[in-house]
Structure formats: C-alpha cells, structure tokens
Image (spheres, helix red, strand yellow):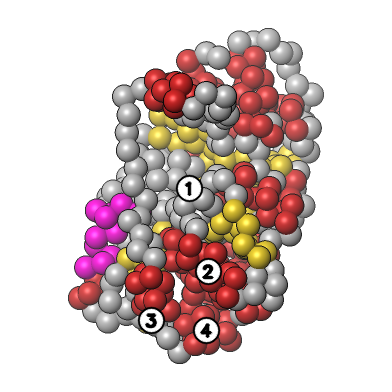
Amino acid sequence: MGELLACFKAYDVRGIVPDELNPDVAYAIGRAYGRYTGAKSVCVGYDIRLSGPELGDALAKGLNEEGCDVIDLGMVGTEMVYFATAHYGYDGGVMITASHNPPEYNGMKMVRQESRPISGDTGLNDIERLTQEFLDGQHENGAGGGSVRKLDCYADFVQHLLKVCPAEELRDFKVLASPGNGAAGIAMEALMPHLPLNVTRMMFEPDGEFPNGVPNPILEESRAPVEEEMRRNKYDLGIAWDGDYDRCFLLDENGMFIEGYYIVGLLAQAILVDNPGATIIYDPRLMWNTQEIVAASGGKAVMCKSGHAFIKERMRAENAVYGGEMSAHHYFRDHWYCDSGMIPMLLVLKLMKKTGKTLGELVGAMIEKFPCSGEVNSKVASVPDVLARVEAAYPGVRLTGRMD
C-alpha cells in the first residue's frame, strides 16, 4: 500500500492531518466504502476536531459519486452514529473522530447495517485496497446522483437513552460532569432537561483547539482537574468522557477515580438484576472480579479477546445483554451491541438510587478483594521486531491481525 494509507489500522482509520489523512483520501474512502458495501444511505458525523467538517464534506462527495445518499448528522459522538445507523435503518455509518489521539490526528470508524462494525477481517482491508486504487486513478467515475441532507438526531437519541434508563429511576444526585471540551457537552445539554440531576458543568464547551488538552481521562493528568474539583466541593458522582464520548469514566463521592475493571463488574451486577441468567461478555484483562460477580448474580460470564469488533461479534453470537472492557468501553444489547458513554452513567446513577449506596460503597469490596493496577501502556522502538521475538519464543504460534 502507498504511504498515504498509513492511516488504515486494524479496526478503523487514524492518521495525521493532512499528511496521512486529508480531503483527497477522505473522498477516495467515500468512493471505496460506497463501491464495496453497495450502500444507498450512509449517515456521517464528526467530533470537535477542526478538520472534521472538511473531511466529512470530502467523504460525502465520494459517497455521492457512488450513488449513495448521505445523512449529515453534524457534530455528534460516536455512539450517535451507531444509534442513527440502526435506529433509522441506514445502510451504514461513518464517524469522523480520532478519539483521544493528539490534536493533529483525525480518523474514521465505519459500520454497516444495524451498526455492525467494519474492521480488518470484515471489509476494512478491502476498503483500504479500493481507496488506494481510487487514489491511483484505477477506476472510472461512479454513477453519481447521491444527495446530502442534514439531520439533527439529538431528540431521538435522548429518547433512546430514556428508554434504556427512564428518568423516574433516578433522583436529584449532585453530579460533576466534564466532557473535557469534547462533544459530550452537546449531548448532555440535550439530555439534562429530562433528568432530575443537579449537574455542575466543567469544560463543557466543545473546542477543537483542546484548550485543556485532549480529553483522555484514563490518563492521570487529564482527569486531575476533575479530581481536584470533586475534592474541593461535595458531589455524589463525577463523570468524565473522552473526545467522542464512546467511553465514560467515573469518580466516587470522595473524588477517587474508579478503574473500568470495577465498573464492568458493577454494571454486570446491575444488569443481571433485570435480566436473570443473562450472558455477560468480558475481556481477558477482567477476570476474577467479573467472574465472581456474574456467578453470584446468576449470570453466565464469557471471556472474549479485546477489541470492539470481537466483543460485538461475540455478544451477538451469545445474545449477551452486556459486554465490558477494562478500557471503559461498555457495550449493550439495547444499544445494538455497541459501546456507549452515556448509558453507563445512567445505569450507575440508577443503581445508586436503588441501593441507597454511594459509588464508593458499591465498589469498595471489589477494590479491596481484587486490587487493580489500571491499564499500563508501554512503547517499543519497533513493533515488528517485538512481534518477531514473541513468535520465535513460541514456535507454532502465529500472530494474526495488523499490529499498528
């Protein structure tokens, strides 16, 4: 593949703008997506990154060239593209986002009908090949004729969330909410009038300049201002999101950051109350706490390798009601097996009301019994060299997938 396609990864598209991802590449991706899938209707959204609208316009132009109608959702979160694709019955959806990557990056997450993910082994490699061919001028012009129309789906999205967790199941908790200047502030502004919560806004304004740094609350320096405010004033719960809010992170009443490991167990426990005997999917980093809680709650715990495409596929195969990863990705059958950053917040608040316990009280025993270091990331000089050493150390084992 050519150098331009360094932006194609195992599960999505991510690259530096404009060197690796730019309007020309976005246009070619649009044509490749339309040609490969045969989609006639695709919704497109983008997060707060400044390059989003321009890339979205180029992507739409490519889709139109292939005869595909584009529904422009505007500035939304990733879960809203998943919602719109499935809820309105579109043939596919593309979210333009680089999530928590540095400001110079942007990317794309692609789904087909019913918001089924498109990743390396389910079409993304073919779309990459076609994209390069379009960039090389190997294909004739498309049939054209596709249109673009704008759609504000926030009202319908809010009603979807309220169906998953009705407002009457919550109470007037005092909540500190911090989108970190990402896109979650827009969704919260649409949702809050329907909830009894007393919400204090922090870094609510969407800002692609990232005045407070790229929102990635899994990093201590990113969540530090939220922790400080939680300890300075009294709140029942603290919530922070990444830029495209497909992940949410929770802090207890004392301002203590709660690792995603324990939230997975907590959500599994809460969901099994209403879904006795249901299947819960978890990733290999989440073992003892999740297994014990699911067993004690009468559910079935099924381990699946990490990665949203694998989790979603396994959830569908098992008809699982919920799936969780230590990275704070939470997947729900009621959300078309997709990850959401809004639903976990609502379900934890619901559990707090139902039990009369604080978040700290709900997870305290878990933390004491199963200590967790949190996610630890390392960088290496050469990924291929490291993988080669792993394969040499374990003869007969073949590593699959793109490790980039």
C-alpha gap between disc 3 and disc 2: 18 Å
Q: Residue at x 62, y 31 (%)?
A: 120
Q: Amino acid at mark 1?
A: Asp
Relative vertical location of residue 12 with respect to residue 186 in this rendering, above or below: above
Question: Quick check: marks 2 and 1 in contact, CB under 8 Å?
Answer: no
C-alpha gap between disc 1 and disc 3: 35 Å
Residue marked by disc 2: 292
Per the image, label 4 sits on a secondary structure element best described as: loop
Pick the quarter of the image with the N terminus.
Answer: top right
Per the image, label 2 sits on a secondary structure element best described as: helix
Q: Is residue 222 magenta?
A: yes
Q: Residues within 10 Å of mark 4 (few under 14, many from 20)?
A: many
The magenta-colored residue range is: 217-228
Q: Of label 1 and label 4, which has the lower sequence position?
A: 1
Q: Measured from the top left, where is residue 385 in percent x and y?
A: 39, 20
Whether residue 224 is visible here, answered yes or no, is yes
Q: Of label 1 and label 3, which has the lower sequence position?
A: 1
Residue marked by disc 4: 170
Question: Quick check: marks 4 and 3 in contact, CB under 8 Å?
Answer: no
Residue marked by disc 3: 361
C-alpha gap between disc 4 and disc 2: 27 Å
